[in-house]
């Protein structure tokens, strides 16, 4: 496998990992104290929620985070922006699909297909 394809996969896998690592969502799920002023204003509301409701709010935050990453990849694709990671120019659509499609596949745990 080529170095640029390996780097493409690494980047998509890393973005998928970032999509499910929203710190605020984790705090909500775990009933952790909010430390920043912007978070404190929501603290009382979040404390009034039961565990199922907190999980639903945290899920929405995770979905918004992954949606933002997806939207950025769509923007890059629509504007024909090439991706570079660690100084390596990444291949465009190495699997015959757009980068945002590959990202969504990684979010859902799909295996990497063979390169085209």
Image: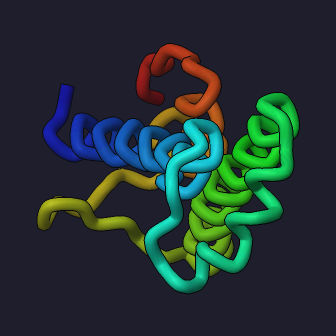
Q: Is residue 13 left or right of residue 90?
A: right
Q: Is residue 50 above or below residue 109?
A: below
Judged from this view, the residue extending furthest toward the bottom is 37
Q: Residue 55, percent across and down?
A: 75, 36
Q: Residue 61, percent across and down?
A: 70, 54
Residue name at image x 37 percent, y 66 percent: 83
Q: Identify the image quadrant of residue 82.
A: bottom left
Q: Residue 41, percent across and down?
A: 70, 79
Residue name at image x 75 percent, y 65 percent: 44
- Quadrant of the image for the N terminus? top left
Q: Can the viewer see residue 19?
A: no
Q: Can the viewer see residue 4?
A: yes
Q: Is residue 47 above or below residue 115?
A: below
Q: Is residue 77 above or below residue 3?
A: below
Q: How many marks?
A: 0
Q: Residue 92 versus residue 110: which sits nearer the camera? A: 110
Residue name at image x 60 percent, y 70 percent: 72
Q: Residue 31 versus residue 99: which sits nearer the camera? A: 31
Q: Identify the image quadrant of residue 79.
A: bottom right
Q: Residue 63 versus residue 12: which sits nearer the camera? A: 63
Q: Residue 88, percent across and down?
A: 17, 60
Residue name at image x 29 percent, y 39 percent: 10
**What colour scheme does the image use?**
rainbow
Q: Is residue 108 above or below residue 96?
A: above
């Amino acid at each position: 496998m080529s170095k640029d394809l390996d780097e493409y996969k690494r980047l998509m896998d890393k973005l998928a990992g970032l999509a499910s690592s929203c710190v605020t969502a984790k705090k909500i799920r775990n009933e952790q104290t909010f430390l920043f002023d912007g978070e404190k204003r929501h603290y009382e509301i979040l404390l009034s929620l039961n565990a199922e409701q907190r999980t639903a709010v945290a899920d929405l935050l995770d979905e918004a985070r992954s949606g933002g990453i997806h939207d950025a990849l769509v923007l890059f694709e629509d504007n024909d922006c090439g991706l570079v990671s660690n100084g390596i120019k990444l291949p465009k659509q190495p699997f015959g699909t757009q980068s945002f499609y590959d990202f969504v596949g990684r979010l859902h745990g799909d295996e990497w297909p063979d390169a085209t």
